Amino acid sequence: MPTPHPLSPPSPWVERFAPLVRAGGPVLDLACGGGRHLRLFHRLGHPVVGLDRDLSGVADLDGGTNVALVQADLESSDSGISPTSLPLDGTFAGIVVTNYLHRPLFPAILAALEPGGVLIYETFADGNARFGRPSSPDFLLRRGELLETVRGRLQVVAFEQGELSVPKPAVVQRICAVAGDDPLPL
């Protein structure tokens, strides 16, 4: 079995909102990388799906109970991914996306949430270029872009944008939002 790759800890943003995901509900970690959030939700008792073009960072989880790994290039026209669907069956109680942006996937991500499903999204934003990569506007959220993306589709639980110093200096935007119109617990 391959040696697991060194993991960074889960994002505090993701950890903060993980309890909002329906207990035992399936969770998708989109562009899962090394699987830090896939592993977090698995430890919390969720069946998990990791989707990425390179699954080497989660190879140690392959064949595990309640773990599904799907290899797909999210940005390739040959991937079977369309703006309205991901190459997966069903919907998810939670979808986590961190440090990844491919705008054409936004409709498919929102459509893959079950009623009451939780979107936890955190990635780089305008202004990050002064700290290094990513620096291309193609990979940086515009001011308020995540809010605009979910407007009229999801209820916003929390939203932040600004500069971080930990784990390294960066400009990020992040949102936690829930599908449906039911009142959210405070």
Image (cartoon, rainbow, N blue to C red):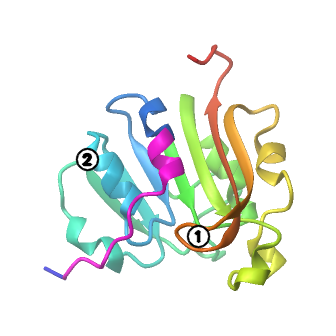
Q: Which mark is residue 2?
A: none
Give the amino acid type for the residue marked by disc 2 in the picture: Arg
Q: Which residue is mark 2?
A: 43
Report the mark closest to the observer, 1 or 2: 2
Q: Which mark is residue 74?
A: 1
Q: Which residues are magenta?
A: 3-16
Determine the residue positioned at 75% across, 74% down.
128
- Magenta segment includes 43: no
Q: Look at the numbered discs 1 and 2 and tell me whether their residues touch, using CB distance below 8 Å.
A: no
Q: Quadrant of the C terminus?
A: top right
- Report x, y in % for residue 58: 31, 70
Does 42 sit above or below residue 57? Answer: above
Give the amino acid type for the residue marked by disc 1 in the picture: Leu
Q: Quadrant of residue 61?
A: bottom left
- Magenta segment includes 11: yes
Residue 137 seen: yes
> Does label 1 or label 2 sit earlier along the sequence?
2
Determine the residue positioned at 27% across, 54% down.
67
Determine the residue positioned at 78% across, 82% down.
130
Q: Quadrant of the N terminus?
A: bottom left
